[in-house]
Amino acid sequence: AATGVEAITRAARYARVAFDYGVDWQVFEEDDVIRISFPTSPTTLAERIATEVGVAAFLHYFRTMGRQDVVPSDVVFSHAAPADTRAHKAFFRGPIRWGAGVPGFAFDAAYAERSVLPKADRSMNQFFERYADDLLEQMQRGTTARARVRAIVEVELANGDPSSGQVAKRLAMSERSLRRTLREEGTTFREVVDEVRHGRALSLLRAPQMSVAQVAYLLGFSDVSTFSRAFKRWTGTSPRAFRRSEVQ
């Protein structure tokens, strides 16, 4: 890739070819900010550590590739902060929000714009891109529609209650085809959304600094009562009762 923007976009696109975490990295450009997201909801200690390592590794790659000391403007993890965060602060050197949504980081787009790679070889790039596309296509053939929908829903929850139409558009298919494909896999769109919300709710409620209202908002619910009813349907208990049982 000849520029930092190309490099970061392709790194996200082909990350699964090298490291298959089961989800795809997402790149969003918002005004003068680029956000790299890793849509997952870790629950176990191993998953939390893997998520932290993944986000840190991606930032390290960009710092190395662009030969710039990139300091992120925002670092996000969906799980609660560990007891000691000194290493995290030393590495990221930017604000870190724990228990706050989709894992990832954001940085000023100027870093990417300044990252021009003078030794970029376009012919070699085209060769490797075709090869990587073939590998990615082979991997995606084995990826279920449910897994692809989950990855998109993980990101879209921050913007409210995602619709099947929105997700179908992101997958470049009709809403009817999406519903049929999920039905063939033994599930529905609403069941996948519930599954994602349930997993993330458990993770967020374990973060004591997050209020129940904040958790409801991050999960795309319109109000706390709607979230509480859904949580009770999933677990048989209320969000506050769950939190008290985790603290004890």
Image: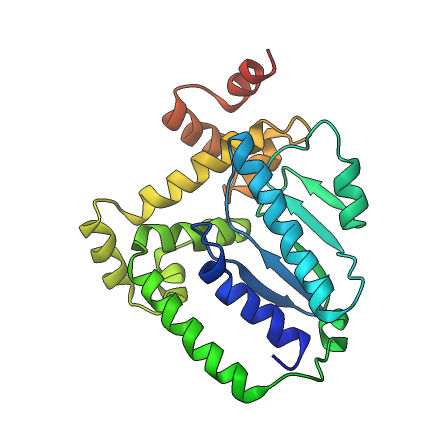
Residue 182 is left or right of residue 112, and the answer is: left
Where's the C terminus, which quadrant? top right
- Quadrant in which residue 85 is drawn: top right
Residue occupying image coordinates x 20% and y 57%: 180
In the foreground, 238 or 50: 50
Residue occupying image coordinates x 64% and y 60%: 35
- Residue, far bottom: 123
Residue 89 is left or right of residue 241, and the answer is: right
- Quadrant in which residue 191 is drawn: top left
- Quadrant in which residue 164 is drawn: bottom left
Where's the N terminus, which quadrant? bottom right
Residue occupying image coordinates x 41% and y 65%: 170
| Image height of 216 relative to 208, above or below | below
| Residue 94 position within the rendered picture, expressed as x and y whole percent measured from the top left | 79, 50
| Residue 125 position within the rendered picture, expressed as x and y whole percent measured from the top left | 53, 82
| Image height of 73 relative to 134, above or below | above
| Image height of 156 relative to 13, above or below | above
| Image height of 171 relative to 155, above or below | below
- Residue, far left: 184
In the foreground, 16 or 210: 16
| Residue 116 position within the rendered picture, expressed as x and y whole percent measured from the top left | 72, 80
